[in-house]
Amino acid sequence: MSTVQTNPGELALRCTNLHRYLGQGEGRVHVLKGVSFEARRGQVYAIVGPSGCGKSTLLYLLGLLDQPDEGQIEINGAAMSNSDDFARTRARGGHIGFVFQFHFLMLEFTALENVMMPMRKLGRLTPAEMKARAHGLLDSVGLGAKTHRLGTQLSGGEQQRVAVARALANQPTILLADEPTGNLDVKNSALVFDLLTRLAKEQGQAVVLVTHNPEIAQRCDFTRPMRDGLFV
Amino acid sequence: MSPNLRIAYRFLTAKKRAMLMSLACTILGVGLFIVTQATTRGFEEFFTKTLLGINGALRIEDKMQDTMRSLQAAGSSDAYFAQREGVKLIEGIEEPQLIAGAVRGFPNVRAVSAVVRGNVQVTSSFKTEDAQIFGINLEDHIRVSDLAQQITNGTLADFRDSAGGALMGRVLADRLQLGVGDSFVLAARGQSRSVRVAAIFETGYREADKTNVYLHQPAARSLLKKPAGASFLQVMLHDPERAPLDAARMKQVLGHDVKPWQEREKTWLAVFRALRISTGITVTVFTLIASLAMFNTLAMIVLEKTKDIAILRSMGYERRDITQIFLWQAGIVLAIGAVVGAGFGVGVTWLVSLVPLPINGIFKTDTFIVAWSGMPLFIAQAIATALVMVMIASLVPARRAARLEPGDIVRGTAQ
Ligand SMILES: Nc1ncnc2c1ncn2[C@@H]1O[C@H](COP(=O)(O)OP(=O)(O)O)[C@@H](O)[C@H]1O
Ligand SMILES: [Mg+2]
């Protein structure tokens, strides 16, 4: 459990001049128009902006799930924008936790198995340690009693909380969350948000989240408003 | 359990109906492969055994003498031309004891029997038929043939004890309306001799049952006016498959023409080979269907699980892992299909072996013939064929899944 050195202030993520076009031919859209952004450890960043301004697109690029048409991305000092699929996959598994906007759980698996899934791939812990850690994470998102429920037997909000626990499984240095509290009630969104900020402070993670909730945005260390493919 | 295998298992069980479909096809493919192989091979082996039981593995016949020397003696000036004159055949075997002794020295040789053969006419009170007599030393001959097992009426002991006795083929006996104990007349080269039917044999091979009459060698010699020598030596080998090799070496060493059974029965063996190929094609089609079903199942699962693939990729699972997850699914179906299919194949083969099917003419049987001894090989072949074909078919959807870009999937634009 020593992957995250508490070294607040250190640069975890940097992107410069990101451009991304989406769609084909006539429908081709210039979605990101030269976005630059930095995230440091121990800090929580909120990206806010109207629907369709490119927040998710940016987050996918930062999460190395997609590749920019132009611009640079650095993860913990390593340039990733031109690296191959294998290197990007490794970085995703070891450094990045991602919470999707539409809480993708693997529905044939239990909550516990979903959380253990990234750990099994990384293989850093013993099976018993993985299980213990997964239980701990589910406890901290308030699902300690539902660890053995299948994805299909959980409500949308519960699935979202499992997804948050899963994103934290490998103790990533960078946590990217696309509207993680969008499907949650007030009580649970507070729970998830508190968990994310506490981790940032205690373990020195860089947390970047997209949110529509002004209250949450306010409580972040930094807020980056975005409009039409650019930070304003 | 490896994480990829675990994921594969869950993906598969989430699509039970499609999975069971490809499993059923795999079981059928493996099972039918085994059944068809066991029966075609069974008939072929039985036919071979029948033929070996009549004529042995090798037959040593006429001596081949180089004619070059005699031409040179005649004063030919062109030695090269003389060499091309080839060989002259001296009919039969002049010194059967000598040659038999030499043949016994070959390690693969089990037994040798010298035979005197001739064409005769057989006359009963009912009618006359053409036939061939074989003058044998019984004790030698039952070691190079299945004659002892082919007796259907009378006894071999009766033949052994009567110098004027004969063993007659079933078809010939029926045509002449002869039974055990009846007398008939053999005529050859102006000679004739009265002989008694000591026993009737049936090989199942019509040619033999229609023409063959076995006599004790002294009786045959006197009828055919052949006081010395033999027409051919019949040889049985420990490993009949090696007959062509042994034949070639004997030919070289003995200077006699030596025919292995494979050459003798070329025509029939070609028929069986064609049969084996045609059933092989049928069976391959079954396996092909199994692999198509697997392809279909996996392609369906890939389509349904694109989101899961994106999730796995986002967590650090590599393209290689995704390929593996889908190949494992094929592997699980194959493993179950192989085990159940083998059991199914063996069971059906057993049932088939009980099916009544009277055949007579090229061999004699009352039921389907099954090659149990080859079973482990057939099972291995069936599984190997299914493995190769299903794995190849699975590679396509597996690689397609691995190529999916997580970004495209989460945006919903994955094709
Ligand atoms: N495949 C696509 N082809 C064309 N345009 C797309 C495609 N996917 C997304 N877009 C456009 O990109 C813009 C940004 O989308 P997104 O990043 O999801 O916005 P946000 O998350 O801020 O709501 C939107 O205007 C959307 O219509
Ligand atoms: Mg979005």
Image: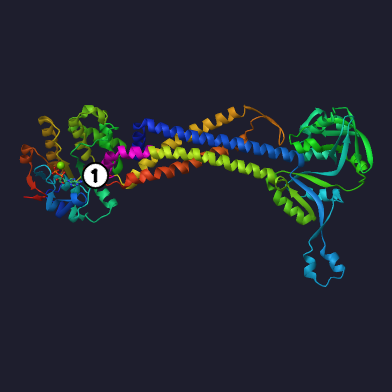
* Camera-side residue of B127 and B65: B127
Outermost residue toward the front?
Answer: B127
Query: Looking at the rendering, in which quadrant would you find the C terminus of chain B?
Result: top left
From the top left corner, tell me how far across and down residue A176 is, in percent.
17, 44
Using residue A26 as the reference point, say whether residue B32 is left or right of it: right
Q: Residues within 10 Å of mark 1 (few under 14, many from 20)?
A: few
Quarter assignment of residue B33? top right
Using residue B271 as the reference point, say whether residue B101 is left or right of it: right
Quarter assignment of residue B7? top left
From the top left corner, tell me how far across and down residue B318 is, in percent.
31, 46
* Mark 1 residue's CB less than 8 Å from ligand 1: yes
From the top left corner, tell me how far across and down residue B113 is, in percent.
81, 43
Res. B269 in view:
yes
Which residue lies at the image location 91% right of the left edge and 39% below the top edge?
Answer: B187
Most frequent secondary structure within the magenta stretch: helix
* Camera-side residue of B283 and B237: B283
Using residue B128 as the reference point, say whether residue B240 is left or right of it: left
As drawn, B353 above or below B189: above
Which residue lies at the image location 19% right of the left edge and 40% below the top edge?
Answer: A100
Check the residue under mark 1 and report the chain it is in: B
Amino acid tagged 1: Thr
Query: Looking at the rendering, in which quadrant would you find the N terminus of chain B?
Result: top left
Quarter assignment of residue A82? bottom left
* Camera-side residue of B59 and A73: B59
* Camera-side residue of A173 and B19: B19
Q: Which quadrant does ligand 2 occupy?
A: top left
From the top left corner, tell me how far across and down residue B71 is, in percent.
84, 66
As drawn, B231 above or below A113: below
Q: Which residues are magenta?
A: B297-316
Residue B46 falls within the magenta-colored stretch: no
- Provide the residue designation for mark 1: B413
